[in-house]
Image (cartoon, rainbow, N blue to C red):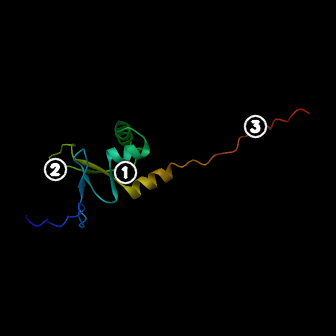
Amino acid sequence: MPAKRPARSKRSTRSKPKNNSHGDIEIPGFLSREELSRRLRLSVRTLDRLNTARTGPPRIEITSGTGRRHGLVAYKLEHVAAWLSARAVTPQPLNRPRLRRAR
């Protein structure tokens, strides 16, 4: 009988970019459109609308250089965190008289 090979680890010890189901490369410190939309519970289309209105989080577009806009879109985590912080709303007290209880 031939000798058994030792079991190989399924995980690589090298750190390398991974491909997700959409073919985008996962880069540490960045989020894809799909991942950001999942985390914010917004649709990808809403993120696109926010970008068009220039009210969304800053994004990075990596294109092929041919002028077409079908490249990779990535959001830096720090930029998303700053964008969310800028949108924080402090609750204001209501300016209405208090109702008294009837005795």
Q: Position of residue 90 (x, y in %)?
A: 61, 49
Looking at marks 1 and 2 on the same chain, the residue that comes earlier in the sequence is marked by 1
Residue at disc 1, secondary structure:
loop
Tell me the kind of residue under disc 2: Gly
Q: CA distance from mark 1 to mark 2?
A: 20 Å
| Quadrant of image for the N terminus | bottom left
Q: Position of residue 16 (x, y in %)?
A: 23, 62
Above or below residue 22? Residue 26 is: below
Mark 1 surroundings: few (<14), some (14-19) or many (≥20) residues within 10 A: some
Left or right: 88 as drawn, with respect to 58 = right
Residue at disc 3, secondary structure:
loop
Dot 2 corresponds to which residue? 65
Tell me the kind of residue under disc 1: Pro
Q: Residue at x 43, y 41 (%)?
A: 41
Q: Quadrant of residue 81?
A: bottom left
Q: Position of residue 9 (x, y in %)?
A: 23, 64
Looking at marks 1 and 3 on the same chain, the residue that comes earlier in the sequence is marked by 1
Q: Which mark is residue 96?
A: 3
